[in-house]
Amino acid sequence: MKLICPECKNEVDLSSYTDLAVGQVIECNVCGISLLISAIEGENVVAEVVDEGK
């Protein structure tokens, strides 16, 4: 699956999230911002910012 961080525009490494689900909060491994998974559309994951990070 593929997710582009809406904050830093880098691809987020999803390999550590085995059971990714809508409503789950993950962290961008590049900028550290918290992202809420809002949709999973095939191989594309859509997320929105929930916290401004570190």
Image (tube, rainbow, N blue to C red):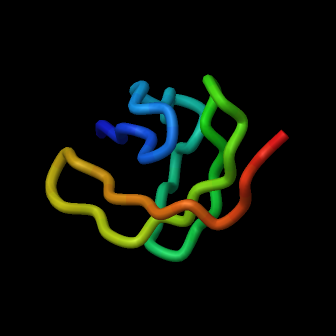
Q: Which of 49 and 1 lies nearest the eye of the viewer?
A: 49
- Identify the image quadrant of the N terminus: top left
Count of numbered circles on the image: 0
- Compared to residue 13, the image places residue 37 above or below, namely below
User: How far across and how far down the image is residue 42, in percent?
Assistant: 15, 54
Give the image location of residue 28, x and y in percent: 61, 37
Percent x, y of residue 12: 48, 31
Q: Looking at the picture, tell me which residue is in the foreground, 22 or 38.
A: 38
Q: Quadrant of the C terminus?
A: top right
Write the residue at 36% across / 41% down. 3
The picture places residue 21, in percent across and down from the top left corner, at: 46, 66
Residue under the point 52% across and 44% down: 18
Q: Depth check: 17 or 35 in front?
A: 35
Please identify the residue farthest to the right as the structure is shown.
54
Q: Residue at x 63, y 52 (%)?
A: 26
Q: Is residue 39 left or right of residue 8?
A: left
Please report the residue visible at 42 percent of the width from the left and 25 percent of the height from the top: 10
| Snapshot quadrant of residue 35 | bottom right
Q: Is residue 3 left or right of residue 36?
A: left
